[in-house]
Amino acid sequence: MSVHASMDDGLGKVVLDHPPLNILTREVMAGLRRELARLAQEPTLRVLILRAEGKHFSAGADVGEHLPPEYRELIPEFTETVDDLASFPLPVIAAVQGRCLGGGFELAMAADIIVAAEGASFGQPEILLGVLPPAACAMLPLRLPHGLAAEIVLGGDAFAAEEAERIGLVRRVVPEAELGEATTEIARKMTRHSAAALRIGKRMLAGEPGPLRRALDRAGALYVDELMETEDAREGLQAFIEKRRPEWRHR
């Protein structure tokens, strides 16, 4: 199984297990949505940890699935997956090690709290392929000043966990060997409490319902209906698959 889940004494865990880079294929995302839906119904669940097996959290979505015609199914499924995680009824903590890039970073941002290992790197490199990260375009402006959000999305460079902590995207950076312990420590502070109170608290912290879902829908529609109609988007994705430098035509 590429995604598996467990629950013990109020603490749930969902694990990405799709080596070596935990690429978020449509199959992996469907598995994640199924486990989130199942765990959301557990009456005594209080906290959910999202983590990944192996050296890397996730290097992002499957580039091949971004090509025509599959992207028309992929993008709505991806934004739905992010929204399912962001709107999960209880607190979600992401434990991140290694590369956390593209769709992997967008998935981690949907958690309430990110704990990162030293040496982890974050970034939205989609612009290097002539495309854009729809969920990051929806979430980053809600979390960061416009200039920081624009630099991450339109610059495309990866940055270290310590920088992610400095700008407020990561709550804590710890030695990699302590990642599981540090994440569980934060989670256990919450499992002491009432599941009912935690569910209502999650809704209160989220503010008015709807802004993120509307932003995700808008970004996804722009990706499918406009971005993928450009020559450069298709060229960038094809060049990546063919392991060559893209030749931009700027249209």
Image: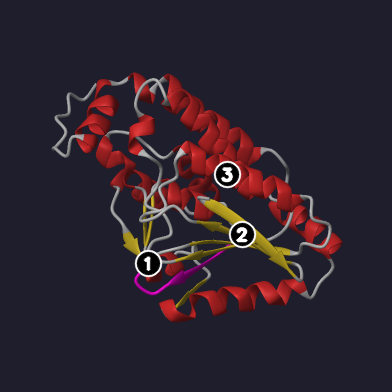
Relative vertical location of residue 4 with respect to residue 172 in this rendering, above or below: above
Which is nearer the eye, 98 or 213?
98
- Residue at 36% x, 23% y is 228
- Pick the residue in front: 119 or 57: 57
Residue 120 is tagged as 1
Q: Give the residues drawn in magenta, as a range.
A: 112-120
Quarter holding the C terminus is top left
Disc 3, SS: helix
Q: Which residue is mark 3?
A: 31
Q: Of the residues under marks 2 and 3, which one precedes in the sequence?
A: 3
Residue plotted at (23% across, 30% down)? 238
The residue sitting at the front extreme is 1
In percent of width and height, residue 159 lies at 33, 61
Q: Which mark is residue 13?
A: none
Q: Nearer the viewer, mark 2 or mark 1?
A: 1
Q: Amino acid at mark 1?
A: Ala
Tell me the CA gap for discs 2 and 1: 18 Å
Q: Can the viewer see residue 56? A: yes
Which tag, 2 or 1, sits closer to the chain's start?
A: 2
Is 236 part of what is drawn in magenta? no
